[in-house]
Image: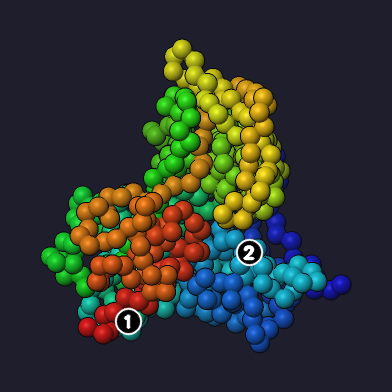
Amino acid sequence: MEGMVRVPVREQEPKVRATNFEEVCYGYNSEEAVEEASRCLNCKNAQCMKGCPVAIDIPAFIQQIKEGSFEEAYQKISESSALPAVCGRVCPQESQCEGKCIRGIKGEPVAIGKLERFAADWARENGIKPKKADASNGRKVAVIGSGPAGLTCAGDLAKLGYEVTIFEALHQAGGVLSYGIPEFRLPKDEVVAAEVANVEALGVKIEKNVVIGKSVTVDELLENEGFEAVFIGSGAGLPRFMGIPGEQANGVFSANEFLTRNNLMKAFKEEYETPIFHGKKVVVVGGGNVAMDAARTALRLGAEVHIVYRRGEEELPARREEVHHAKEEGIIFDLLQNPTEILVNEDGWVRGIRIIKMELGEPDESGRRSPIEIPGSEYEIECDTVIMSLGTSPNPLISSTTVGLDTNRRKCIIASEENGATSKPGVFAGGDAVTGAATVILAMGAGKAAAKGIHEFLSAK
C-alpha cells in the first residue's frame, strides 16, 4: 500500500565501507526528504513527541520539510535540540519517536531521525545558525563537560540570556561525541565540530584542558569565580572489567581507551603520531552499541573480529541498525558465550581467550533472562587482542572534591530527574554522571531539564 514503506536511505556497500572510516549512511537528498516527509500523517495528538526526550515538535518540522521550507524545519528543531545533526545519526529512534509513530502500526514508521539529520545537514551546508538570545542577563553559569548533556544545558541557558562557560577536560570539545563514537557513524570535523560551533554561536564560551577537581573545584567556581550555578555533565568515562585472570596482559583494552585513541587521537590515520596496537584477530566482549563501535573499528584496522556476548541475539542491547551493519561488514557473533580467562604467552601478550557456553535461565531483576554457565562446555579462541566493552561509571574526581555533593554506591551523582538539582544548592547534574553510561539523547534530555531547573533556581534568587 502507498505510504506504508519508507524511502530507503543510501549507504556505502558493506565490503567497501569495511575498509574505510568514511560515513556509512549518506542520508536523504532534498527530493528523498520531501518524499519521506510526505508520509507523515501530521497527527494532532502526536505520539512521536511523547517518545522524544527533548520534546522536539516533530510534526511541525516534518511539515516544513514536506513544504520545502528546510531552514524553517531546522529552526523548529533547534528550539528544542542543540545537536540535531548528531541526534539524527545516533539516537535510538526505533525505541523512541519512531517507535511510537502511528505509521508503524500497519507499515514502517516515518524516518524521523533521517529527516532530522537532513534538516541539520542542509542548514550546515547553507550556513544557517540557530537563533540566539536578544541580550545577556549578566548572570554566569558554569557547565562541566562538553558532551551532549553539557552542550544541551549550555545551549538552552544561552538562549535564555545567561553567560555560560563550559569547562572541558580534554583538548577537544564534544565529549563522547568526539572520543567515543567512531568517524564512520559520526564524522568529527564535518558534524561534531559544526554542532559545537553552533552552541558557541549562541554565546557559550568553551575552556578546554580544564580538569574540574584538579585545575579548579566546583566550590571554587561558585565562591571565587562569580558563577551563580554549576551544571555537572562530566559523563562516565571510567571503564569496567570482568576481574578474570589475564586482564592485565598486553593486548587487552577497554573499549573506552580503544575508541578514544582511534577517534579523538586519530590512531587509524598513518600520518598521526598516536598509533595503537591492533591485532589480526580481535575479540570484543559485550553486546552494546559501544561493543559494536569497537568491533567495527577493529575490523576497519584489518582484523578478523568476534563479538562474545553472554546472552542471545534478541537480548543484544545494541541498536538493531548497528547489529545489522556489523553483520553486513563481516563481524562474527559468538552469542550465549562468556569469557572465563584471557590466555597470555611468555612475553606477556594475549594469545587467546577461554570461553564457556551459556544458556538463558529465569529473568533477573531487570526482567532479562539470566545467563547460566553450561558445565564442561569451555573452549579456547586464538586471538591477539581483547577489547572489554562492559560499560563505564563516572570518575569520582568531581564528587570527591565537592563539599556536600551526594553520590550513590556506584559513585554516580544523585540528582533530581525532574530538574537536575543535587544535594548541594546551586549545583545541578545530569547525563551519564548521574545515570551511568546511557544514550546521547537521554543525556541531552537531562541537560535540558537541568537548564530549566537552573533558570527557575536563579529566577527565584
| Kind of residue indicated by mark 1 | Glu
Q: Position of residue 411 (x, y in %)?
A: 35, 52
User: Which of the marked residues, 2 or 1, is nearer the chain's N terminus?
Assistant: 2
Is residue 405 in sight in this rendering? yes
| Secondary structure state at the residue bearing disc 1 | helix
Residue farthest to the left, as pictured: 224
Residue farthest to the top, as pictured: 346
Apparent side of residue 194 relative to residue 333 in the rendered image (left or right) = left
Q: On the image, numbered disc 1 is attached to which residue? A: 456
Q: Position of residue 70 (x, y in %)?
A: 58, 76
The residues bearing labels 2 and 1 have C-alpha atoms spaced at a distance of 31 Å
In the image, 116 versus 210, the foreground residue is 210
- Please identify the quadrant where the N terminus is shown: bottom right
| Kind of residue indicated by mark 2 | Ser
Q: On the image, numbered disc 2 is attached to which residue? A: 95
Q: Position of residue 456 (x, y in %)?
A: 32, 81
Q: Residue at x 51, y 41 (%)?
A: 389
| Secondary structure state at the residue bearing disc 2 | helix
Q: Is residue 356 above or below residue 292?
A: above
